[in-house]
Image (cartoon, grey):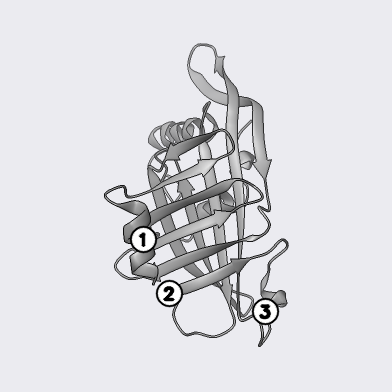
Amino acid sequence: MVGWMLLAMTGCDPGSFMYPGGEAELRTMTWRIDQEAGDTKLRVFLSNSVLPCTFPEGDDEARNRALADLQLAVCREDARHVGLVLYQRDDNGWTGTFPARAGANPAALTDEVPRLASGSYVGIEEAFLVQVDGLDRWYAPAEESFFPDLGEGWVDVEEGATLQGTFAFPEAGVSGHFEATVCDGRDGLLELLVDDPLLLCP
């Protein structure tokens, strides 16, 4: 069923999503499974900006330049980001459907509800460019839409060489599909992007 739904909804498009007022083509789609305090969760980050899933490394100059590029990509005008977190009680693989609920977390899992999902959305409606001495520059959001909990809906994924999925949060007006590659890094950036990318903005 999952594969049929993906073929019907995606065609040749690797990823896009609808948000209130528009549609965005996805340029970053990444995922990772994390074990935290005895709980297992799967994080997915989606964006219409090109973003890494780990913080830049290298010498100070190169790292600072890469950090500035990261900040610009997250905080630019019309940047759109979706974070998904999937929870399950049993280790039976991740393929299948995860109902989304407001306030979903591992503690809410039961025998009757062995899977849950949550979603978040950030849209930068307007941003202005800040420059210091004509050298350093970054974007500061002037108007943004931030929904840390998209509430009721569902996420459907198929685990393989890539993670293919569809999602819908009808009341929030956010839905889409993706084909994500795994993120191997564990330096905290993916968690930040999924939970609240605005923390990277001035």
Residue 139 drawn above or below residue 45: above
Residue 75 visible in the shown view: yes
**Badge 2 is on which residue?**
95
Q: Residue at x 52, y 50 (%)?
A: 175
Q: Residue at x 58, y 31 (%)?
A: 124
Q: Work out how far the residue at label 2 is from the one at label 1, CA to CA, in angstroms.
A: 13 Å
Tag 3: amino acid:
Leu
Q: Work out how far the residue at label 1 is from the one at label 3, CA to CA, in angstroms.
A: 27 Å
Element marked by disc 3? loop
Element marked by disc 2? loop
Q: Depth check: give the residue in front, 47 or 8.
A: 8
Tag 2: amino acid:
Thr
Q: Depth check: give the residue in front, 52 or 97.
A: 97
**Badge 3 is on which residue?**
109
C-beta proximity under 8 Å, tags 2 and 1: no
Q: Residues within 10 Å of mark 3 (few under 14, many from 20)?
A: some
**Badge 1 is on which residue?**
6
State the image coordinates of residue 62 (x, y, percent, origin top left).
Answer: 38, 35
Element marked by disc 1? helix
Q: Depth check: give the residue in front, 165 or 88.
A: 165
